[in-house]
């Protein structure tokens, strides 16, 4: 069955319907484009054709975009260029039909789906919440290459087009209507009727005025789109902001700006030619391949089974007990209640519960403002509905009704054991127990429990409402049922779960600790906090190591370091300088002083640091890359050890965890993918040289040396399933 077919509705009126029989969602690949060509041939043969509505045959979903996995598999630029040219030709045939064309958009309309809709003369969209229209290609290391970068500015104007293409954000139907991306947004039940009405309106226009086009509505619009000086200023500003945001590490946004600039004001064919050439370069480049791989790994983590037995089904989680109303507890409570789960949050301190509820309210309000819902009444209704699912309590009453219990109390083994001892007694026998520990052993926490098979780890990252990762920790006694229920819960609340073994520090903190410790070694070698942090920001990390330590809290970092140093004394012994800072009462951002001085939302390096920690000499970093190399190699080496010890199943899980949980630069693909790009043999050689120069902490991991000797790599292509 073809992906596209023509349905004749009445004399002269046709629906061009995409409904791929082999997929749950519509995707544009080479086969689909070939089917589109065949359907267009049928339409072109009908001399009495009066109008065409492009729609989806899948309820609640339009077209989800191009086939990402096909892009990942293509390695030759010429192959990409041929695919893009075929899409341009097919979309051009749709745009050139002798009759009016209208896209009726309901549901997800992304990437190539939006570009196909842009080839129509006009668009109408449903105003239902599931309708999202956007061009997210820049998030995958490319830009809209099926005509979107050329057609969108002509429809919505330069400013709006740059915003959509450079951010990759999506719009609902009403927002799309406001910027002119769709002619109107209507209730879903009336969508087709309004598409037919729009066709009738367009039939009354001269052919050369049939297509929707941008017209400046105010002076600002005219200043940008109506004169060359305004356009030049807009492009200059876009480049400046893009370089500041990406550090020059992501080539797609700058390439998109160049393509839009080259095509604006030129015939459509000129813009499409620039588009095809530039996107073909990007699609076979390393950044695109790395970003697509991370997308594939994320999709796998959200969908793949986590136990071998398919008969093990997760327990439904309707009610959650949360013990501990601190910073993490408040974030977890907000997240769970947002996704429809009733949360009974317990703490021994009334003030802690009050602060947690304030945290929940502030997160809800922030999210509402970010989504553009500034109306106080709307915000209040959203907040009240979510808050109604939260019950703060000082006692354990009602615990027996919950399906899942999670603790987020102080990182102390004895305290957490007492919490679980009480939970085991008060919860239903089948209820799952979880710990949000960042470093303590799940097996150790389960000692003394009658049914430790109910216990697993559920490690969030701070801030909970922003960080996408959850490490789901499987202890030796954790049952398949507990594991699949925890993973299902993580997916339900919008997180990306990575299943890890019960090993000290799990994955993220274990790999981060040698990195942070190496930063301390560099400080002890005389390099400044500013230079060390700057070197890692240039590498692509969102924050430098000392900025991270201040953000996490020096007391928290020391506690985690203590746990890891007992497990790995050869390379993770806490830094004496860090201990001296702690003794001086410098806890980081929360105390106002750490490696930096924190005041009024800003931070400045504290020149007294060297004196406080007892370090005298200071040197200037003549080669910043040498600093970042030492810290990056420390991460790669520890990641190789984690893989060798089977803390996770494969290299992809480590790369995903480090990008989503620690901010490792996604354009580098994760620590193990980055090692592959450098060459595993080269990595081993550098570690060996640093071992001779700096000591045993740089001894290459056994797996790394084995792969180097065999000429092999850490990473493999991601196995994917059909959409």
Image: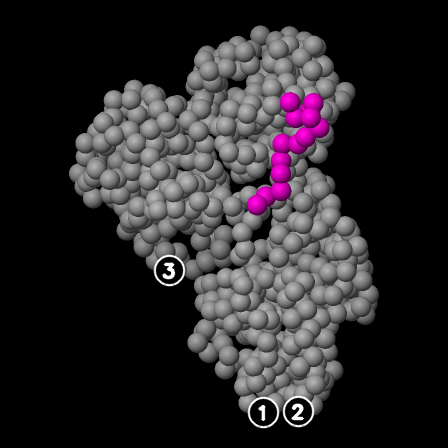
- Residue 11: give its label: 1
Helix, strand or loop at disc 3?
A: helix
Q: Is residue 206 above or below residue 260?
A: below
Observer able to see residue 239: no
x then y, percent, for residue 504: 45, 22
Identify the coloring.
Answer: one colour
Residue at 46 percent of width and 27 percent of height: 506
Density class for disc 2 (Cα within 10 Å; few <14, some 14-19, many ≥20) is few
- Residue 377: give its label: 3
C-alpha separation, residue under disc 2 versus residue under disc 1: 8 Å
Which of 252 and 695 lies nearest the eye of the viewer? 695
Density class for disc 1 (Cα within 10 Å; few <14, some 14-19, many ≥20) is few
Select label 2 or label 3 by which is in front: 2
Helix, strand or loop at disc 1?
A: loop
Residue at 69 percent of width and 15 percent of height: 688
Is residue 715 magenta-colored?
A: yes
Span shown in magenta: 706-719
Where, by quadrant of the figure, is residue 323 drawn? top left
Dominant SS in magenta: loop
- Residue 614: give its label: none
x then y, percent, for residue 200: 59, 87
Pointers 2 and 1 in contact (C-beta within 8 Å) = yes
Where, by quadrant of the figure, is residue 286 drawn? top right
- Residue 48: give its label: 2
x then y, percent, for residue 132: 53, 62
């Amino acid at each position: 069955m073809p992906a596209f077919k023509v349905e004749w509705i009445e004399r002269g009126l046709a629906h061009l319907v995409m409904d791929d029989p082999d997929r749950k969602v519509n995707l544009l690949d080479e086969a689909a484009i070939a089917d589109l060509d065949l359907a267009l041939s049928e339409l072109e043969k009908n001399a009495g054709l009066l109008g065409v509505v492009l729609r989806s045959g899948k309820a609640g979903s339009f077209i989800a975009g191009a086939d990402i996995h096909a892009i990942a598999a293509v390695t030759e630029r010429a192959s990409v260029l041929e695919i893009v040219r075929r899409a341009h030709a097919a979309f051009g045939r749709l745009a050139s039909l002798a009759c009016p064309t209208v896209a009726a958009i309901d549901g997800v309309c992304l990437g190539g789906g939006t570009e196909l809709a842009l080839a129509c003369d006009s668009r109408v969209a449903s105003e239902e919440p599931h309708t999202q229209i956007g061009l997210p290609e820049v998030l995958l290391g490319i830009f809209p290459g099926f005509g979107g970068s050329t057609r969108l500015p002509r429809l919505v104007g330069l400013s709006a087009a740059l915003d959509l293409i450079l951010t990759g954000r999506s719009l609902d139907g009403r927002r799309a209507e406001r910027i002119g991306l769709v002619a109107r947004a209507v209730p879903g039940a009336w969508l087709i009727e309004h598409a037919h009405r729009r066709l009738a309106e367009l039939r009354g226009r001269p052919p050369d005025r049939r297509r929707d086009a941008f017209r400046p509505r105010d002076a600002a619009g005219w200043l940008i789109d109506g004169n060359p000086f305004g356009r030049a200023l807009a492009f200059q500003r876009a480049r400046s902001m893009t370089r500041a945001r990406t550090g020059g590490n992501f080539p797609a946004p700058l390439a998109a700006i160049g393509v839009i600039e080259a095509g604006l004001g030129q015939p459509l064919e000129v813009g499409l030619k620039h588009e095809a050439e530039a996107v073909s370069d990007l699609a076979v480049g390393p950044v695109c391949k790395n970003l697509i791989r991370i997308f594939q790994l994320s999709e796998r983590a959200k969908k793949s089974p986590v136990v071998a037995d398919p008969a093990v089904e997760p327990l439904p989680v309707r009610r959650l007990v949360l013990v501990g109303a601190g910073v993490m507890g408040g974030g977890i409570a907000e997240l769970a209640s947002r996704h429809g789960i009733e949360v009974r949050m317990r703490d021994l301190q009334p003030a802690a519960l009050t602060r947690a509820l304030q945290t929940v309210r502030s997160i809800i309000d922030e999210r509402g403002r970010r989504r553009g819902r500034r109306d106080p009444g709307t915000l209040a209704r959203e907040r009240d509905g979510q808050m109604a699912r939260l019950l703060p309590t000082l006692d354990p009453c009602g615990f027996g009704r919950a399906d899942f219990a999670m603790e987020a109390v102080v990182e102390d083994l004895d305290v957490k054991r007492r919490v679980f001892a009480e939970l085991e007694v008060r919860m239903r026998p089948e209820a799952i127990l979880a710990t949000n520990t960042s470093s303590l052993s799940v097996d150790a926490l389960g000692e003394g429990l009658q049914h430790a098979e109910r216990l697993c780890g559920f490690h969030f990252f701070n801030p909970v409402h922003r960080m996408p990762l959850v490490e789901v920790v499987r202890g030796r006694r954790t049952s398949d049922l507990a594991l699949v229920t925890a993973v299902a819960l993580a997916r339900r609340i919008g997180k990306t779960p990575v299943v890890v073994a019960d090993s000290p520090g799990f994955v993220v903190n274990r790999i981060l600790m040698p990195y942070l410790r190496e930063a301390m070694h560099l400080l002890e070698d005389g390099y400044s906090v500013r230079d060390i942090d700057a070197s890692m920001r240039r590498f692509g990390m969102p924050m430098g190591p000392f900025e991270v330590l201040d953000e996490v809290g020096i007391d928290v970092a020391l506690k985690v370091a203590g746990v890891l140093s007992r497990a790995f004394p050869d390379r993770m012994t806490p830094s004496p300088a860090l201990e001296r800072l702690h003794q001086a009462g410098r806890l980081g951002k929360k105390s106002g002083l750490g490696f930096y001085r924190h005041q009024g939302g800003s931070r400045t390096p504290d020149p007294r640091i060297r004196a406080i920690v007892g370090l005298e000499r200071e040197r200037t970093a003549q080669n910043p890359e040498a600093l970042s190399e030492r810290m990056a190699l420390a991460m790669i080496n520890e990641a190789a050890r984690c893989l060798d010890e089977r803390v996770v199943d494969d290299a992809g899980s480590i790369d995903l965890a480090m990008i989503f949980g620690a901010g490792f630069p996604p354009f580098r693909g994760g620590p193990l993918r980055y090692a592959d790009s450098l060459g595993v043999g080269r990595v081993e050689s550098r570690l060996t040289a640093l071992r001779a120069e700096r000591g045993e902490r740089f001894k290459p991991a056994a797996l790394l040396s084995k792969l180097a000797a065999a000429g092999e790599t850490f990473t493999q292509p991601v196995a994917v399933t059909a959409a």
